Every structure is written in C-alpha cells, then in structure tokens.
Image (cartoon, helix red, strand yellow):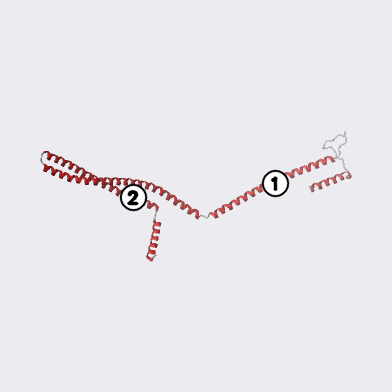
Amino acid sequence: MGLFDRIKRVVSANLNDLVNKAEDPEKMLEQAILEMQEDLVQLRQGVAQAIAAQKRTEKQYNDAQNEINKWQRNAQLALQKGDENLARQALERKKTYTETGTALKTSLDQQNIQVETLKRNLIQLESKISEAKTKKEMLKARITTAKAQEQLQGMVSGMNTSSAMAAFERMEEKVLMQEARAQSAGELASADLETQFAQLESGSDVDDELAALKASLAPASPPNQPQLPPQQQATPPQSPQSSEPIDSELESLRKQLDQM
C-alpha cells in the first residue's frame, strides 16, 4: 500500500468519525423529512407537466383524427362529383394526417404509461413521507428516553453506592444492638422482680414457721382459771432456768435461717 493511499484512508477515517460525532439523530430525521418533502414537490411538478403534455398530445391526436375523417369525406365527395384528381389530393392529405396521428398515438401511449408511473411514484412517496413522520415521532420519543436513561445511569454511577450501603449496614447493626440491649434490660428487670417476690415468699414462710414455733412453746393456761382482761392480766415471772432452753433453741433456729 502506497503512502498516498494510507494518507487517504487516515483522512477518510477521521472525517467519518467527525461526521458520526456531529450527527444529531433528531436533526438528521428532520432534515430527511425536509428532503423527502422537496422531492415530493418536484415529483408533483413533474406529474403536472407530464399530464399537461399528455393532454396536448391527446388533443393533437384527436385533431389529427378529425382531419383524417374530414379528408376522407372530401375524397368521397370528389369521387361523387367525378373529380378523381381532387379525390386523389384529398386522400394524400388524409395520408399525411394518418401518419401524424399514428406518431401521436405512439407518443400518447408512452405518455399515458409515464403519467401512470409518476402517479404511482407520487402516491408511494406521499405514503413514505407519512410513514417517516410517524417514525420520526417514535424515534424522537426513544431518543428522549435514551437520553434520560443515560443521564440517570450517569447519576447512579457517580454515586458511591458501596459506602452508602456500608452506612446502611452500620446503622442496621446499631439498631440491632440497641434492640438487643433493650430486650436484655427487660429480661433483667423481669428476673429481678421475680427474685424480689421469691424472697418475699421465702421470708413469709420463715416468719410463719417462727410464729408457729412461738405458739407451740408458749405455756398453756391452767383450766377453769378466769382470765383477766388484757389490761389486768399479769404475766407470771419466769425463772432464768425455764427460759434458757427456749432462748438457746431460738438462737439455733436463727443461725439455721441465716445459713439458708
């Protein structure tokens, strides 16, 4: 490959890259519609001109047919009058118009085909323009959506999602720890309350047992002895010897309760 070919290829590649970057899809669609509409205007003008030419040729052909018919009648009239020379001249004039009419008929047939083709092309171009306009609106909507998605993707990619998720995880861990501490405190409070009630129940049992022991150890009153009112009832003095066993047993019970 020669140097100039390589340079040409490099220049072409750079130009194509610049053109691709400069192409705006929305503007290109608008330009394409404008160009198609310009073609439609030119095609309509061409169809109008072709139809006008067709009408002229058709008129000329009809005029030629009228002349042919006229000179045919003239030739017949001349023969009826016995003027064969004049009849011959009329037939020669008829021949001229016949040749002209034949040429006009050929041209008219070609023009009819051309006009029909142009009309079909005109209808197709109008249909394509209508379809292009519909596609243009759809593509514009897709372009808008794509731009919005691209901007959103840029925003999402610009966000530090890993650190954000780590922050959420840390906050969740703190919430879980706080919930665990609250649950532990509730369990401890409930356990402490149950312990207090258990202590009250155990203390009540000991007090009941102590009262029962006191009642069993109290001296019985002699029978048929009138009891004095509480204010007048005298407590007989107890000798030190009779109270010592009770005090000793009571002390022993207290030690047992202390050891429980």
Relative to residue 118, is residue 215 drawn left or right? right
The residue lying furthest to the top in this view is 224
Marks 1 and 2 sit apart, C-alpha to C-alpha, by 89 Å
Residue 174: x and y, percent?
A: 60, 52
Is 92 or 133 nearer to us in this picture?
92
Q: Which mark is residue 36?
A: 2
Residue 1 figure quarter: bottom left
Residue 32: x and y, percent?
A: 36, 51
Residue 129: x and y, percent?
A: 35, 47
Relative to residue 60, is residue 121 drawn left or right? right
Q: Name which of mark 1 and mark 2 comes first in the sequence.
A: 2
- How many marks the image carries: the answer is 2
> Mark 1 touching mark 2, by CB under 8 A?
no
Label 2 crowding class (10 Å Cα cut-off): few <14, some 14-19, many 20+?
A: some
Q: Which mark is residue 247?
A: none
Q: Nearer the viewer, mark 1 or mark 2?
A: 2
Q: Which mark is residue 191?
A: 1
Q: Secondary structure at mark 1?
A: helix
Is 205 or 37 nearer to us in this picture?
37
Is 230 or 248 nearer to us in this picture?
248
Residue 22: x and y, percent?
A: 39, 56
Relative to residue 82, is residue 30 drawn left or right? right
**Three-letter code, disc 2:** Met
Q: Residue shown at 84%/40% (left/top)?
A: 216
Q: Residue shown at 21%/45% (left/top)?
A: 102
Q: Secondary structure at mark 2?
A: helix
**Three-letter code, disc 1:** Ala
Is 67 or 18 nearer to us in this picture?
67
The residue lying furthest to the left in this view is 82
Q: Residue shown at 87%/45% (left/top)?
A: 245
